[in-house]
């Protein structure tokens, strides 16, 4: 089913049965993505890690463990989750570490990447003494996107060491460093990776040949499982690094793992009369609480059986049940009028959703539901008043 326009897809029976709101993630769709990623690993020798900042549904970690080399984390709690629930290699990067965090991470992580030369000088020796392979995040200063909020190469970026800094640093100070790490992409194709890799080689080529260097981590943001992605170009980039520099290559996508594998099932609470040319629909699902990327990016998720505004006969503006006037998901059109009690199914809702939810206005968090290979669904987690009370 992956890749077909939302309005052409048939409803899965679970979407009509589950309590709402609910994130519903389908095993078969996950497996489709994982098989593509496994093929890249097998053909290139690269290692692909799950970026938990995007998808942390540990219910599926035993499945992911069969295909991926491990997990990558943005801090102690994610690292612990990957270490305890999935196994394999555990990697971490953070813009800065607290001393107590570093000590804890050094006990469970295989790789720790440092964001600055100061962090490397402060913590590198301690991490190495614990048996950790240490890396340094670099900033190629080469942007391939126009989304400033997601561009670590933008002017004034706090992320990564620039070439000028590295060239001014004493070479003996890099002894023991085993890896370099760059992460510059966001929902991009292999063309952006090839362009970035060329910039890395041009600027940091001599450092890719440092004595003792063992690996290069190309970060995340790779849309590897998106239809039309140039897999052959990706493989060529990986093989070039392995052959030219003799380095192990890591990729750490999150979206590619769970792309198009999940849905957010919601219910229509009220259809309001049209005013000022707008027909508002109130859902039990909130952009602010349940899909914050809609407001942050901004992002307009596709809806099953829904079209663009004005494309079909009845156009509505979806909004959440919070007091925030801007809690708006977007405008969609339908062939038939919507009514209270109907289901609205948002697509591609496994990624950057569960990991970003909040309980603003005391709104309940969506249930988390898994659909197995046979199509049977089960609630993995549900959240009541106790979760709201605990968080505040």
Image (cartoon, rainbow, N blue to C red):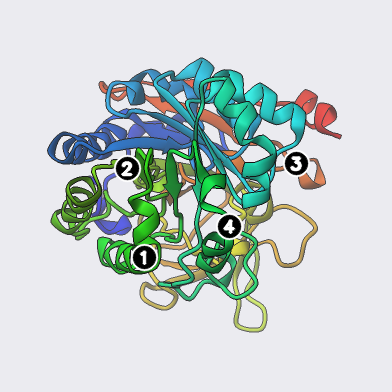
Quarter of the figure with the N terminus: top left
Q: Which of marks 3 and 1 is nearer the N terminus?
A: 1
Cβ atoms under marks 2 and 4 closer than 8 Å: no
Q: Residues within 10 Å of mark 4 (few under 14, many from 20)?
A: few
Q: 254 or 177: which is nearer to us?
A: 177
Please tell me in which quadrant of the rendered image residue 280 appears: bottom right
Badge nearest the viewer, 4 or 3: 4
Q: Can see residue 382? A: no
Residue designated by label 1: 335
Give the x, y percent position of residue 53: 54, 41
Q: Which of marks 4 and 3 is nearer the N terminus?
A: 4
Q: Earlier in the sequence, mark 2 or mark 1?
A: 2
Q: Which of marks 2 and 4 is nearer the N terminus?
A: 2
In the image, residue 222 sits, relative to residue 371, either above or below, namely: below
Residue designated by label 2: 11
Q: Residue at x 27, y 51 (%)?
A: 224
Q: How far apart are marks 1 and 4 (CA)?
A: 64 Å
Badge nearest the viewer, 1 or 4: 4
Q: In the figure, is residue 248 to the left or right of 94?
A: left
Q: Distance between the residues labelled 2 and 4?
A: 59 Å
Q: How far apart are marks 2 and 3 (CA)?
A: 29 Å
Residue designated by label 3: 359
Q: Can see residue 287? A: yes
């Amino acid at each position: 089913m992956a890749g077909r326009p939302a309005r052409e897809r048939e409803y899965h029976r679970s979407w009509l049965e589950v309590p709402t709101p609910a994130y519903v993630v389908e095993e078969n769709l996950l497996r489709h993505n994982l098989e593509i990623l496994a093929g890249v690993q097998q053909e290139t020798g690269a290692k692909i890690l799950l970026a938990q900042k995007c998808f942390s549904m540990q219910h599926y970690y035993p499945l992911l463990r069969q295909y991926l080399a491990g997990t990558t984390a943005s801090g102690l709690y994610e690292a612990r989750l990957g270490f305890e629930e999935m196994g394999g290699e555990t990697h971490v990067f953070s813009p800065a570490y607290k001393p107590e965090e570093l000590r804890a991470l050094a006990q469970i992580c295989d790789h720790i990447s440092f964001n600055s030369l100061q962090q490397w000088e402060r913590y590198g020796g301690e991490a190495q003494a614990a048996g950790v392979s240490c890396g340094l995040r670099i900033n190629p200063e080469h942007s391939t996107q126009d989304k400033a909020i997601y561009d670590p190469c933008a002017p004034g970026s706090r992320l990564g060491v620039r070439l000028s800094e590295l060239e001014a640093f004493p070479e003996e100070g890099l002894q023991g460093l085993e890896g370099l790490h760059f992460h510059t992409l966001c929902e991009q194709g292999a063309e952006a990776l090839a362009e970035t890799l060329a910039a890395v080689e041009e600027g940091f080529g001599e450092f890719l040949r440092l004595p003792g260097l063992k690996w290069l981590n190309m970060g995340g943001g790779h849309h590897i499982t998106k239809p039309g992605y140039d897999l052959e170009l990706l493989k060529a980039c990986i093989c070039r690094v392995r052959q030219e520099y003799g380095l192990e290559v890591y990729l750490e996508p999150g979206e590619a793992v769970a792309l198009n594998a999940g849905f957010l099932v919601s219910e229509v609470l009220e259809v309001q009369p049209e005013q000022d040319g707008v027909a508002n629909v109130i859902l039990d699902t909130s952009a602010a609480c349940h899909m914050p990327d809609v407001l942050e990016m901004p992002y307009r998720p596709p809806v099953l059986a829904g079209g663009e505004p004005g494309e079909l006969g009845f156009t509505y503006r979806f909004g959440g049940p919070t007091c925030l006037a801007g809690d708006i998901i977007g405008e969609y059109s339908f062939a038939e009028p919507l009514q209270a009690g109907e289901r609205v199914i948002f697509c591609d809702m496994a990624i950057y959703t569960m990991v970003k939810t909040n309980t603003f206005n005391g709104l309940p968090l969506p249930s988390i539901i898994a659909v197995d290979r046979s199509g049977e669904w089960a609630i993995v987690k549900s959240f009541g008043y106790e979760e709201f009370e605990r968080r505040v």
